[in-house]
Amino acid sequence: MYVGRKAPDSWDASVYLCGPTPTDPAEPSWRPAAVAALRAAWAGPGRLAVFLPEPAAGGDYPAYADQIAWEEVAMRRSDVVLFWIPRDMARLPGLVSNIKWGAWYDSGRAVLGAPPEAERMAYLLHFADALGVPVERTLPGAAEAALRAVGTGGRRTGGERAVPLPVWRSEPFRRWYADGRAAGLRLLDARVEWYEPAPSPAAGPAWLLTVTVAPGDGAAPSVARLLAAQGQGMLM
């Protein structure tokens, strides 16, 4: 989905393509190649949604505030935020990408890609290594790392799309959501406020999720917070 366009009503996996966009019209964007790599490598049974924060060929960017709002919603709903930063300080500095990396590097959903010649990447690579963020040096490799993270995905519709796969697949969320649906609850929206990866393959992640739900009795929608702690299940 190009910037400003409405997202599909459902998907099985979603990837946001984050990184610098060339300002020179003569310089091609890297994102079409990333989309091609994702399309070639995707082996899931359902729909893979890919968010591109740039217009389609020949299109225009929305107003700046609308662009930022679209990007924030798209990243929040993405299962993976794939960073590709071919930084060249003279022509493609990627300064905004540093801000976005700072917002998402510890989300449990980041993949960092940069060619070996990319400039001033040491700080980003340091924290990727410290937190176990996948790092790739080619664009196809970064696309494959993103798809390894989502696996075969998981179908989500409507407000469910705001629950990223690491939370969607967790046992505390699945139990809470199954009980809620049995009572007629509808999930309208969600936001991950905090996420801590599982400390081992046998353990689950910890997370804090704000949810907006419509009760089955027809009452007005309400907002709640769900906290899952490692080894303790749902606490609230």
Image (tube, rainbow, N blue to C red):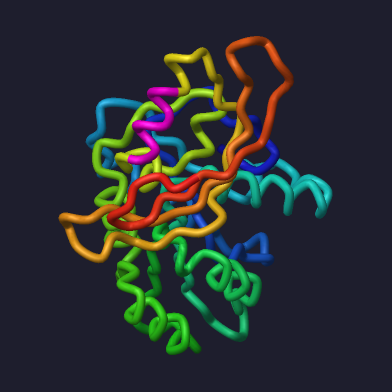
- For image coordinates 39% across by 82% down, the residue present is 125
96 lies left or right of 125: right
- For image coordinates 25% across by 33% down, the residue present is 44
Q: Main secondary structure of the magenta part?
A: helix
* Depth check, front residue: 49 or 62: 49
229 lies left or right of 190: left
Residue 217 seen in render: yes
The span picked out in magenta is: 172-179
- For image coordinates 47% across by 23% down, the residue present is 180
Q: Residue furthest top?
A: 217
184 lies left or right of 111: right
Place of residue 219 in the rendered image (x, y in percent of width and height, measured from the top left): 70, 16
Place of residue 159 in the rendered image (x, y in percent of width and height, measured from the top left): 56, 29
* Depth check, front residue: 217 or 135: 217
Place of residue 174 in the rendered image (x, y in percent of width and height, measured from the top left): 35, 33
Place of residue 70 in the rendered image (x, y in percent of width and height, measured from the top left): 69, 45
Locate the N terminus and report the quarter of the image it occupies.
Answer: top right
Magenta span contains residue 177: yes
- For image coordinates 44% across by 54% down, the residue present is 207
